[in-house]
Image (spheres, grey):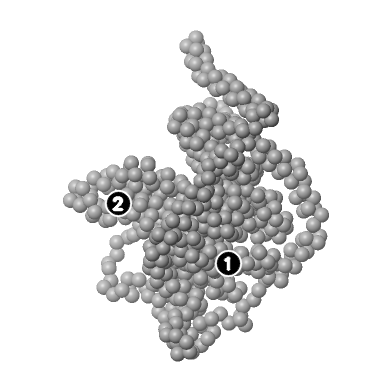
Amino acid sequence: MTATASAGETRSRPVQVWLLVWAVALAAVLVVFLLQDRLPWAVNYPASAVVPVADWVSALMRWIKSNLSWLTRSITAVLGVPLDFALNLLAKNFKIGHGAEAYVLPRLSWVGVCAAAFITGHAAGGRKLSLLVGGCFLYIALFGQWTSAMLTLGLISIAVPFCIVTGLFAGIWAWRKPWAERLIVSPALDLMQTIPTFAYLIPMLLLFGNSPVSAMIATAIFATPPMVRATMLGLSRVPSEIDDFSEMAGCTARQKLWRVLLPSARPTLMVGVNQVIMLALNMVIIASMIGAGGLGYDVLLALRALKVGEAMEAGLAIVALAIALDRLSQAIAHSQAKGHVHQEVSPSLWRRYPNLTLAIAILVVTTLLGLFVPALAVVPKAITFTTAPLWKAAVNWVTINFFDTIEAFRVALILNLLNPLRAFCEGFPWLGAVFLLGLAGYQLSGLRLAVLVAALTAFCAITGLWEKTMATVYLCGISAFIACLIGIPIGLMASRSDRFEKIVTPVIDTLQVLPSFCFIIPVVMLFRVGDVTAMIATIAFAVVPAIRYTNHGIRQVPPALIEAAKVSGCTPRQTFFRVQLPLALPEIMLGVNQTILMALAMIIICAMVGTRDLGQEVFIALSKADSGRGIVAGLAIAFIGIVADRLFSAWTAKARARLG
């Protein structure tokens, strides 16, 4: 009994010590805040001490542009060849010659592309997938969005293979060289995935000009990390027995990699391909600002002109394209995971690939017939229709009938929640934030994490972006908090009811494939521009991980532990709150971490609707082609994400270690 009591005292002593440390630290920060008149440098970073990192980056980019223009032009010329071919094949026409004597070869027939979509869907997932994929392409055609959608698809068709090949080789290198993965690849991937999408556009615009090639390069940089991570994960999960068997069979290192390990990791690799496609689609839409064109450009123009109907139609076309590509790539990944039954190989190509042969034949025939039948080459206007007037009328009706209610809700949020929280965050001492976050890092994982977190936080201050950084933290924080308040209870209910899970899953699947642009459009219609619009759009965008990870965390609790709790006499409520919930807490916190990162990504895009934070800095830099200002603001955003990710990951690892 005495030993048990002493052990309990030993465990509680570190907790008491840390509580005392945190009490002293918070008291010190409070003193600094109260004495800000005497210690102004500890609250607001002195303007005279700002390090001109943005000027240094701008000077570097100017030097690269002036001295390496031959290289960037060569890259543009090389990448422009396949890109022009894809755009001409899908959206434009091939033009041979010049002037009036030029001969024009038509693009692929829209009828043929829709038929190929039906066939591909049937081959990958049967009748239901065929109707879904083909229906999405038919929807795009009938709503008059075909050319814009094909411009977007053409850019994706070149960017995605580039991402896959680059990510595959980078992942193989990182898997083979653990030091490279730790020192080079992982930090690079963290930056690539946390730097906001708009920050990619500025150096691309400066180096490669306002062109589809710039958009493609930005898309490739943004969409490559999932393929790298999937390659590393897939290769590391290949059973050691397969590796040993390949060596016993006499395979060389190259044969073992390409003929044994990579085929064994194919299901995981296909998940990476799916993520690459979705990120590429999201980025291509955003890259419309630097010459990508397509559906994203249509949405951007409509939003700028406040043409609600046109923006909604283009946004729904983006949704249709996203759903088609997502479901198709998921079905292919699922079929790869099932493996293949050995069948006798037919010598003829068309017998081995009948669906591919049929799709190509239909494309060729309909495209050639399009030379004589214009309705096959271009979607006839007679069969297209628009719902833009309906959307406009619906928005007008809601505005007229519910304006007072919506406006009262918006003003109440601003006055009672957003403005006080913003004032608190922007007035928080920068030195106190660096100190407290460093202390949290030290408690969770030691000195190394403490130094990293403190250094990244201090960067936001010494570059003169502290006020903008805290404005970003305030909006991201409140959005992520509300998303968790909504998502975690929904995930808990889904984990306890299979019927409710079947209702929730299609909804969150749809939310997950929607590009970020699509969340802004309906909210702007109702709440106009400002922080409320940004917050609501961000909540809708970021709520999915909170639901999904909570549901998964509760369901993955070992059944043996649940049975043990029941045998011990626990009621269902006690089993849930005292066994399942504590064991699922690390998984739930991982969902909170992902919610924060998604909220941060969305907040930056919401700078389009009038927020005043780091996203606005990036937008201003993009409009002025100020690479230094944009890159430094992008790095500050990335560092916010990295700090949150590292702290939550350390807490999750510590919780899992404690639970065993």
Above or below: residue 218 compared with residue 138? above
Picture mark count: 2
Expressed as whole percent of the image width and height from the top left, the position of residue 576 reads 58, 34
Q: CA distance from mark 2 to mark 1?
A: 42 Å
Q: Camera-side residue: 105 or 473? A: 473
Camera-nearest residue between 1 and 187: 187
Residue 300 sits in quarter? bottom right
Q: Is residue 512 above or below residue 138?
A: above
- Taking the image as shown, residue 536 lies to the left or right of residue 199, namely right
Where on the picture, by quarter, is residue 178? top left
Q: Amino acid at mark 1?
A: Tyr
Question: For residue 81, which quarter of the picture?
Answer: bottom left
The residue that mark 2 highlights is 261
Residue 361 lies left or right of residue 38; in this view the side is left
Residue topped by disc 1:
297
- Disc 2 and disc 1 in contact, CB within 8 angstroms: no
| Residue 272 in sight in this render | no
Vertical position of residue 28 compared to residue 204: above or below:
above
Residue extending farthest left: 250
Is residue 227 among what the camera can see?
A: yes
**Residue 511: percent from the left, percent from the top?**
58, 55
Measuring 56% from the left and 19% from the top, which residue is drawn there?
16
Q: Identify the residue shown where x is 81% and y is 60%.
A: 401
SS at circle 1: helix
Residue 145 vertical position relative to residue 97 in the rendered view, above or below: above
Three-letter amino acid code at the position of disc 2: Leu
Residue 256 image offset from top left, x and y in percent: 25, 52
Q: Circle 2 sits in a helix, a strand or a loop, which is it? A: helix
First in residue order: circle 2 vs circle 1: 2
Q: Who is closer to the viewer here, 340 or 167?
A: 167
Residue 335: image tag? none
